[in-house]
Image (cartoon, rainbow, N blue to C red):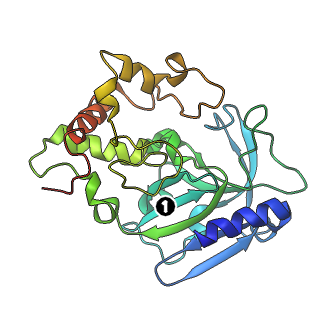
Amino acid sequence: MKALLFALITLSGAAQAAEFEVQLDDTRHTWSSEELLNHPQARDIEVSDDVSYKRSMQYRAVPISALLDGVTPGDHLQAVALDGFAAELPAAILLASEGAKAWLAIEDPQHPWPPLAPGKPGAGPFYLVWLDPAASQIGPEQWPFQVARIRQLAPVEQRFPALLPANDAGAEVQAGFALFQKNCMACHRLNGAGDAEFGPDLNIPHNPTEYFSGDFLRQYIRDPQSLRRWPQGRMPGFSEQVLPSAELERLLAYLRHMAQRKGSTRL
């Protein structure tokens, strides 16, 4: 929390003083925007179909793997944004030499990025972007912008037992739990468990499967504004390409299962 507050104060004071931090088990390293812009591995890259800007964008960026010295593919990481968005990221996808490639885009204070939408800030000062994301099935929640830091943590299962399905839950529910971690946990807690400070809890006091009837929950996940239209709505829609129908059904199976486990730990 102190690191996040420091980043907020730094950014409000002077854009050129923005810092990106990597917190590992035994080490902590910070880089300023200027240091990253001049990093030996910094490159100018073009990201087609940018998830946040919804168009092609060009960035000065560093391979995120170059900033994760000492991290192994079996480690678990979390990218924390200034607004409380907390993306859970297996280190393997960030370190991969094949498939999708992860880059940390750095905003040049002299050439700020455009706002994400009218009246909203841009994606800077740091933004995790991907080249060829489809090659590794990278979802939109794995593109955190306004990133303050990346930190090494224990896996979700160890940190938050209140998220776990019952021992006798079927394979569909277990698969839905994995999809919840990938697609929902960056914004939402469940049973009060999680690090996100962005969206509402998905089980307390009520699970969405308890108050959305028929196909309305599926419609809401696909296109939130089609059911609840308001200017401040920030939940993205999950298209068939991002979340195929079979995966959506597994996610719903997990949510229905957890509606019977409010506040419980694994049994």
Instruction: Find residue 86 and report its horizontal and vertical position in percent.
Output: 51, 54
Specify the quadrant that holds the N terminus: bottom right
Residue 6 falls left or right of residue 38: left
Question: Label 1 amino acid?
Answer: Gln
Q: Is residue 244 visible?
A: yes
Look at 64% across and 31% down and name the residue there.
Answer: 232
Determine whether, in the image, residue 126 is placed left or right of residue 218: right
Q: Quadrant of the C terminus?
A: bottom left
Residue 164, percent from left and from top: 24, 53
Q: Residue furthest front?
A: 205
Question: Where does the image place residue 72, in percent across and percent down from the top left?
Answer: 42, 71
Q: Is residue 165 above or below residue 39?
A: above
Q: Residues within 10 Å of mark 1 (few under 14, many from 20)?
A: many
From what the image shows, is residue 57 above or below residue 74? above
Q: Is residue 15 above or below residue 52?
A: below
User: What is the quadrant of residue 76 in the picture?
Assistant: bottom left
| Residue depicted at x 30% and y 29% | 209
Which residue: 29% across, 65% down? 158
The number of numbered badges drawn on the structure is 1
Q: Name the residue at the left extreme.
A: 168
Residue 41 visible, this orientation: no
Residue 262 picture location, percent across and down: 25, 46
Q: Which residue is mark 1?
A: 78
Q: Residue furthest right?
A: 110
Who's the residue at 28% across and 45% down the image?
177
Q: Is residue 230 above or below residue 36?
A: above
The image quadrant of residue 137 is top left
Instruction: Using residue 159 as the reference point, say whether residue 31 is left or right of it.
Output: right
Q: Which secondary structure, mark 1?
A: strand
Foreground residue, 266 or 150?
A: 266
Looking at the image, which is closer to me, 79 or 206? 206
